[in-house]
Amino acid sequence: AVVSTQSTGGFQTFQQYFKQINLSMRLIGLTGGIASGKSSVGKVLQEEGVVVISCDAAAKQVVEQGCPGYEKVVKKFGRKILLPNGEIDRQKLGAVVFSNRENREILNRCIHPEIAKVVRRRLIWEFFKGTQLVVLDIPLLFESCNIRPYMHSVVLVYCTPEQQKERLMDRNDFTEEAANARINSQWSIDEKRGMADVVIDNTGLFLDTEAATKALVVELKKGIIPIRNILLLIMASIVCFILYNY
């Protein structure tokens, strides 16, 4: 795996918000195609001490029983998508939405606003903690978000379409038809590759991908001044101002 640099809707209400946050926090977008290895790269980033906010995790959270997203999804798609215990059957829901573009758009309208709330709350928390580097793990960053201009850079985890299909069929026990339906519901990973600032190649051994990810962390942290140093600098400036004027 290698890291290469390139030239370069659902969260539209975030635009001004992200612009303000980005003044004091370096926001990195992490994306990729389905089964490209994005989540595995996210785990390595976390192991290296980087804060990662996962939209996939938020999506699962907002459709838990009792959450507003759950109520919206059940209202739109009916109780046929539920398990006997009342939880949403992700396989049944997936079969409904990945075979029909209109159903996918309905699902997105149900859950994207709720996902945005979860991510926004987490970002506010990290902002007040003084976190200066945050990675936003957004699977559909290019397809459905208008926050790209507010990212410091976008990292794409890449594998070939053939590998995507093989991994989906192996990992999720999908038929070839089901795997293709999920892959085709997103933009082509090769198209996304041309839009990313940094590409992590995950076509080979994961040990190489892990090494490339660790090297990326070093690059992302360059130029970031620890918040403690900033506070000390401000305090020193105040003291110097007082001494000079009095």
Image: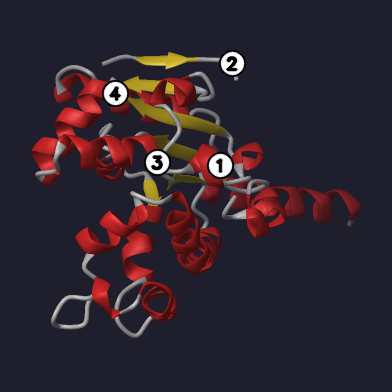
Earlier along the polypeptide chain: callout 2 or callout 1?
2
Residue 60 found in image quarter = bottom left
Q: Amino acid at mark 2?
A: Ser
Image quarter in which the N terminus is found = top left
Name which residue lies at 48% across and 55% down: 102
Q: Are marks 3 and 4 in contact (CB under 8 Å)?
A: no
Mark closer to the observer (4, 2): 4
Name which residue lies at 55% across and 59% down: 127
Earlier along the polypeptide chain: callout 3 or callout 1?
1
Earlier along the polypeptide chain: callout 2 or callout 3?
2
In the visual, does 48 lie left or right of 131?
left
- List the single residue furthest toward the right: 245
Instruction: Identify the disc placed on residue 7.
Output: 2
Q: Which residue is mark 4?
A: 161
Mark closer to the observer (3, 1): 3
Q: Secondary structure at mark 1?
A: strand
- What whole-number distance in Å separates the C-alpha atoms at marks 4 and 2? 23 Å
Image spot of residue 169 (x, y percent): 13, 37
Earlier along the polypeptide chain: callout 3 or callout 4?
4
Q: Which residue is mark 3?
A: 185
Q: Amino acid at mark 1?
A: Arg
> In front here: 66 or 97?
97
- What whole-number distance in Å separates the C-alpha atoms at marks 4 and 1? 31 Å
Q: Are marks 4 and 1 in contact (CB under 8 Å)?
A: no
Name which residue lies at 63% across and 45% down: 146
Q: Residues within 10 Å of mark 2 (few under 14, many from 20)?
A: few
- What whole-number distance in Å separates the C-alpha atoms at marks 3 and 1? 30 Å
Instruction: Identify the disc placed on residue 26.
Output: 1
- What whole-number distance in Å separates the C-alpha atoms at marks 2 and 3? 26 Å
Image spot of residue 179 (x, y percent): 23, 38
Mark closer to the observer (2, 1): 2
